[in-house]
Image (tube, helix red, strand yellow):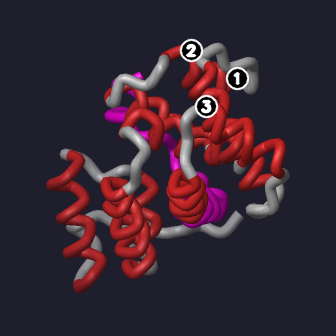
Amino acid sequence: MTDFTFYTPENSSGAAKEILTTVESKYGFIPNLFGYMAEAPYLIEAYTMLSELLDKTDLSASQQQIALLAVSRYNNCGFCQVAHRAFGKMNKANAQTLAAIVANTPIEDVNDKALVDMVLAMTDQRGVVSDEQLNHFFAAGFTRRNLYDLVLIISIKTMSNYANHLTAPEPNEQLLSML
């Protein structure tokens, strides 16, 4: 595997240094994902800009983390699974749902299951979902707008999951301690 440089504010300059300093001030640490993405600062910028747009969706913070975790599990991204389990816990997502996504076991909460089923169907089928899948999602109280919320989530996770596959970052101790 190619050796990638891990950047910090101390060993970077220009846009990378600025973005990493901002990330560190926001989180209190630099998630390892960003340390590698700093090779292309525009990628961190795109990731953070898209992530900020999650606040404009109709999904709650816990629903966002559940969907982000489900895509990360589907894409087999270990780093992001740890991060979204931690942030899911912080945002009071259902603990059984979070554990079930990671273990690929049944989800007990009906609404969480409908959300995960749809995000996985959209990811697996590249957005081509059946009327039956849509009806199941809508029956759980979700809306057409929520489908677009999931398009944003899948886009964000595709970006970070693929970047992580290239660099294989270890989960930060700070994230692991949140589990």
- Report the predominant secondary structure element of the magenta stretch: helix
Q: Is residue 167 magenta?
A: yes
Would you identify the image quadrant in which residue 165 lies?
Answer: bottom right
Q: Pointer 2: what residue?
A: 96
Local secondary structure at mark 1? helix
Q: Is residue 145 magenta?
A: no
**Within-10-Å neighbours for mark 3: few <14, some 14–19, many 20+:** some
Q: Nearer the viewer, residue 8 or 97?
A: 97
Horizontal and vertical percent position of residue 57: 39, 54
Is residue 49 something that shows in the picture?
Answer: yes
Horizontal and vertical percent position of residue 97: 58, 21
Point 43% across, 25% down: residue: 93
Q: Is residue 131 left or right of residue 108?
A: right
Q: Quadrant of the C terminus?
A: top left
Q: Quadrant of the N terminus?
A: bottom right
Q: Pointer 3: what residue?
A: 140
Q: Pointer 1: what residue?
A: 103
**Within-10-Å neighbours for mark 1: few <14, some 14–19, many 20+:** few
Range drawn in magenta: 156-179
**Which one is in front in this view, the residue at disc 1 or the one at disc 3?**
3
Residue 96 versus residue 43 in the image, above or below: above
